[in-house]
């Protein structure tokens, strides 16, 4: 009979590979996303020993630790880890069955602050923020190692300041609106005093889920507060109050009011950022599908250039040198070897192509089912506005 024992051991990649051979009775499938989180910690040098580690039962079968060991094998980084032996075989039914610690549990921050900081990343990373590349590293809003600098940084500070004023995120105080105010301040599009003053005004204008004003402002005071808002922001306030969100419609080439929308916080962030931009916020309605000033507001606050390249199974990705807060420009050559490239710039996908002889005319626009083409002589730029379902012509989401 194997005696129960527990001790910290130095686990090298070779030992980790040997231990994984004993992973013969595990009904739990390997989660590559969980392995990626541990890999990021190992590479960043922030992984540390804890009460969690590797477990073997009395038959010397591994009952816990496959994700940690897989990360060690992949990164080839040795670590010190707790190893328990002599556990009863049935113990695997008791491992990882409790409530998982949330970011709020781990950081002590309110959920509204964490959600506010996450919104911009969810706008630009794949899978609603679950995967992508930022500053040359794999990034995910579910990874505390990646998110912690932003939670403790300027974005988190501004989010906490707004949470101190009001913790409710209903209606006008949606986390997307909060993220837009914070980003506009960080980018210098407005001062911190002005941005927080706008937030205070939105707090005074808020209503409950029954549509009843929460504050005791008189009708005259509410009207006076509304009149102090930029016209475009007031238009957004009115629409949100009516339960609608402006969404750009590709068919009509204009904004339409929608009652059911996905990723509402992200959409409100972009709308609010435009509504805080002094170059456009005195118009009454949103008219541009995509405005460069919104991108500039996200390309801020002092991250270094990123001269990075990495390889997938079939392509070499070139990440351009960009001073950017949250996103990376990526390009790929065209499949037919003609001059040009595919691009994904902040989620806007398309391609550019240069013809050798034939010209399509100067500044000619053509609307297709999936692409909008702009012709500039022999050069044409295509923007995808609807995903192409023809497999050979798809622009897959290749950029971080």
Image (cartoon, grey):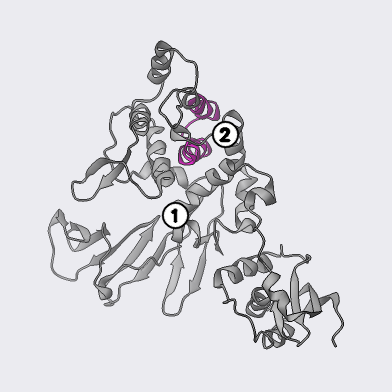
Tell me, yes or no, whether the highlighted magenta stretch contains residue 285.
no
Marks 1 and 2 sit apart, C-alpha to C-alpha, by: 26 Å
Q: Taking 100 as reference, is 198 above or below it?
A: above
Image depth: mark 1 or mark 2 in front = 2
10 Å crowding of disc 1: few (<14), some (14-19), many (20+): many
Q: Residue 124, which numbered label? A: 1
Check if mark 1's residue and mark 2's residue have beta carbons within 8 Å: no
Residue 280, image x, y percentages = 33, 32
Q: Taking 163 as reference, is 307 above or below it?
A: below
In depth, the one of 280 and 36 nearer the eye is 36
Q: Which residue is mark 2?
A: 167
Q: Is residue 272 left or right of residue 23?
A: left
Q: Residue 306, which numbered label? A: none
Residue 265, image x, y percentages = 44, 44
- Stretch in magenta: 174-200
Secondary structure predominantly adopted by residues drawn in magenta: helix
Residue 324 visible in the displayed image: no
Q: Quadrant of residue 15?
A: bottom right
In this rendering, the count of numbered labels is: 2
């Amino acid at each position: 009979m194997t005696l129960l024992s527990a001790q910290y051991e130095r686990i090298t990649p070779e030992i980790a590979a040997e231990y994984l051979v004993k992973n013969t009775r595990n009904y739990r499938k390997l989660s590559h996303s969980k392995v990626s989180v541990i890999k990021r910690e190992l590479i960043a040098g922030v992984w540390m020993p804890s009460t969690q580690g590797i477990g073997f039962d009395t038959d010397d079968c591994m009952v816990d630790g496959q994700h940690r060991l897989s990360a060690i094998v992949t990164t080839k980084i040795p670590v010190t880890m707790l190893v328990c032996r002599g556990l009863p075989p049935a113990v695997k039914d008791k491992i990882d069955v409790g409530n998982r610690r949330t970011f709020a549990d781990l950081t002590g921050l309110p959920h509204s602050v964490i959600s506010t900081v996450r919104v911009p990343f969810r706008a630009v990373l794949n899978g609603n923020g679950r995967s992508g590349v930022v500053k040359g590293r794999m990034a995910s809003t579910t990874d505390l190692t990646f998110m912690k600098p932003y939670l403790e940084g300027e974005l988190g500070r501004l989010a906490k300041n707004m949470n101190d004023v009001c913790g409710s995120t209903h209606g006008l105080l949606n986390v997307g609106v909060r993220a837009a105010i914070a980003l506009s301040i960080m980018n210098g599009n407005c001062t911190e005093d002005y941005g927080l003053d706008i937030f205070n005004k939105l707090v005074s204008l808020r209503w409950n889920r029954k549509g009843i004003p929460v504050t005791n402002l008189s009708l005259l005071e509410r009207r006076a507060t509304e009149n102090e808002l930029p016209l475009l922001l007031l238009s957004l306030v009115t629409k949100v109050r009516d339960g609608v969100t402006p969404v750009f419609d590709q068919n009509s080439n204009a904004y339409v009011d929608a009652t059911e929308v996905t990723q509402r916080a992200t959409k409100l962030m972009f709308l609010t950022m435009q509504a805080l931009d002094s170059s456009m916020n005195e118009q009454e309605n949103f008219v541009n599908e995509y405005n460069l000033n919104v991108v500039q507001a996200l390309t801020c606050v002092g991250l270094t250039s990123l001269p990075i390249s990495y390889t997938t199974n079939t392509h070499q990705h070139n990440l351009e040198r960009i001073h950017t807060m949250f996103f990376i420009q990526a390009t790929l050559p065209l499949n037919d070897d003609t001059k040009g490239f595919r691009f994904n710039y902040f989620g806007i996908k398309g391609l550019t192509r240069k013809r050798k002889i034939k010209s399509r005319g100067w500044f000619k626009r053509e609307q297709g089912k999936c692409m909008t083409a702009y012709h500039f002589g022999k050069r044409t730029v295509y923007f995808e506005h609807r995903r192409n379902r023809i497999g050979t012509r798809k622009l897959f989401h290749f950029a971080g």
